[in-house]
Image (cartoon, grey):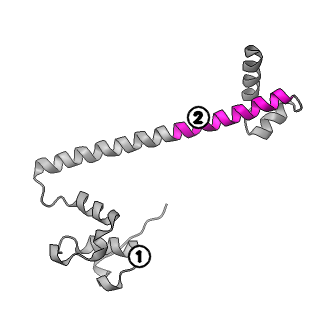
Amino acid sequence: MSFIIVELAKFTKQVAEIETDLEKLVYTMKTLHTTKPTQYPAFWNEEWLRRAIDELDTRKMTPEERAYFARVTAANAEAVKAEKQKIREAVEQNEVAIKTEAVAKAIKRGKLTIEEIAEDSGVSVDFVLEIQRSLTSNS
């Protein structure tokens, strides 16, 4: 993990000098609260900065609106977390299915030992034996 520390007071680049996304972000952090609507730099129209500015601009919100914003943000974060977990589980299930299929094919060929199949497939001997038992019970 890396941390980048920026002293906003030492960031002196003007709009015309800004090139990278990091520079755009630092400039935005430094000047957003003092900029008038007629002075927006063109890069503030980039989708990622536009969304950040819109979502984080709570200066004009009432306390009730801020509380609602906090609840919605927390709910969204939980939803994203749940979706990431579902994706991880789906990937894991897919990997198990692929390994199960490879082990089953190797067992059906009958040319390798259980230990060789386990080693070649990157699974445990118990996993291979379990697949072998399920194949013999289905026959």
Q: Chief secondary structure of the magenta span?
A: helix
Q: Residue 130's mark?
A: none
Residue on which disc 1 sits: 20
Q: Of helix, strand and loop, which one carries label 2?
A: helix
Q: Assign the C terminus to one quadrant of the image.
A: top right
Pinpoint residue 98: horizontal percent, then vertical percent: 67, 36
Task: From the top left corner, tell me how far across and down residue 124 is, in percent.
Answer: 74, 33
> Label 1 amino acid?
Thr
Up/down of 21 relative to 86, above or below: below
Q: How many marks?
A: 2
Q: Secondary structure at mark 1?
A: loop
Mark 1 touching mark 2, by CB under 8 A? no
Marks 1 and 2, how far apart at CA: 40 Å
The answer to which image quadrant residue 45 occupies is: bottom left
| Residue 104 in magenta stretch | yes
Tell me, yes or no, if residue 33 can be seen here: yes
User: In the picture provided, is 53 more to the left or to the right than 61?
Assistant: right
* The residue stretch that appears in magenta: 88-109
Q: What residue would you read off at disc 2?
A: 93
Callout 1 environment at 10 Å: few (<14), some (14 to 19), or many (20+)?
Answer: few
Q: Amino acid at mark 2?
A: Gln
Task: Name the spot of residue 135 as percent of width and height, x first.
Answer: 75, 20
Q: Quadrant of residue 7?
A: bottom left
Residue at 18% from the left image edge and 70% from the top image edge? 33
Q: Is residue 57 left or right of residue 87?
A: left
Picture quadrant of residue 44: bottom left
Q: Residue at x 13, y 55 (%)?
A: 61
